[in-house]
Image (spheres, rainbow, N blue to C red):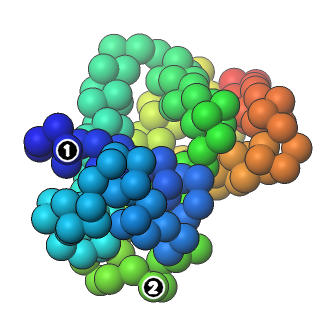
Amino acid sequence: MTLMKDKIVSLADKLIRVKGFNAFSYKDIADPLAVKNAAVHYHFPSKADLGIAVVAGEMQRFQHSTQSWQHLPEDEQLANLFDVFRRHCHAGNVCLMGSLAPDYETLTPPMQEKVNEMAEAIVEWVTAVLENGRKHKRFHFKGAAGDRALLVISNLQSSLLLARVMGAHTFDRISRQLLEDLRS
């Protein structure tokens, strides 16, 4: 990607996490970058194209992170995922999937597909970490690892929303308890 394209995607990512996908326009990107709307359209002819690029970038970061955590014990891998959410919390963001979900029905089919791919990849990774962690006696929980993964992800997403209302300490309390429950 070009430098301008990277800046556009980065700013769109922030706007989606703070305002929501349907709540920003190309003007919200062009103005801070001191370019015309046409410059944004040049790189991303449609807003869906931009949204797909944002999701693709998030997936690349997720895959890079999870690959770099592979050598760690499963509880540390999951704690690292929690830290990613914690950084977003302290930056005033919600997670990308959590931000796109309310707008999902208004997204184009290709963008919906990309969001689905992201959701499935995250659930699949958390499921594998939980199952392997249970085999290695690092996690203790009842039920299927896939069901527990859904609970973990939904708790992380909702804790970011609740932290907006009640403060970042709320996220810290929820994530600490969530990890503690899995370890005991």
Residue 70 higher or lower than 42, as above or below: above
Residue 106 badge: 2
Q: Nearer the viewer, residue 29 or 127?
A: 29
For the view shown, which residue lies furthest in the top direction?
72
Identify the residue shown where x is 59% and y is 60%. Answer: 19
User: Within 10 Å of the Cα at label 2, are there few (<14), some (14-19), or many (20+) other Cα atoms?
Assistant: few
Specify whether residue 150 is in view.
no
Residue type at mark 2: give it: Thr
Horizontal side of residue 91 vs 136, given as left or right: right
Horizontal side of residue 97 vs 83, given as left or right: left
Q: Are marks 1 and 2 in contact (CB under 8 Å)?
A: no
Horizontal side of residue 79 vs 26, given as left or right: right
- Label 2: state its secondary structure: helix
Identify the residue shown where x is 24% and y is 75%. Answer: 46
Question: x and y percent of residue 121 in the render?
Answer: 35, 52
Residue 79 higher or lower than 45, as above or below: above
Question: x and y percent of residue 73 in the render?
Answer: 46, 16
Q: Nearer the viewer, residue 164 or 19?
A: 19
Residue under label 1, please give it: 4
Q: Nearer the viewer, residue 137 or 120?
A: 120
Residue type at mark 1: give it: Met
- For the C terminus, give its image quadrant: top right
Quadrant of the image occupied by residue 141: top right
- For the N terminus, give its image quadrant: top left
Identify the residue shown where x is 48% and y is 48%. Answer: 14
Query: Distance from label 1 to label 2 (Cα)?
Result: 27 Å
Query: From the viewer's perspective, is the residue at label 1 or at label 2 nearer?
Result: 1
Question: x and y percent of residue 152 in the render?
Answer: 63, 46
- Label 1: state its secondary structure: helix
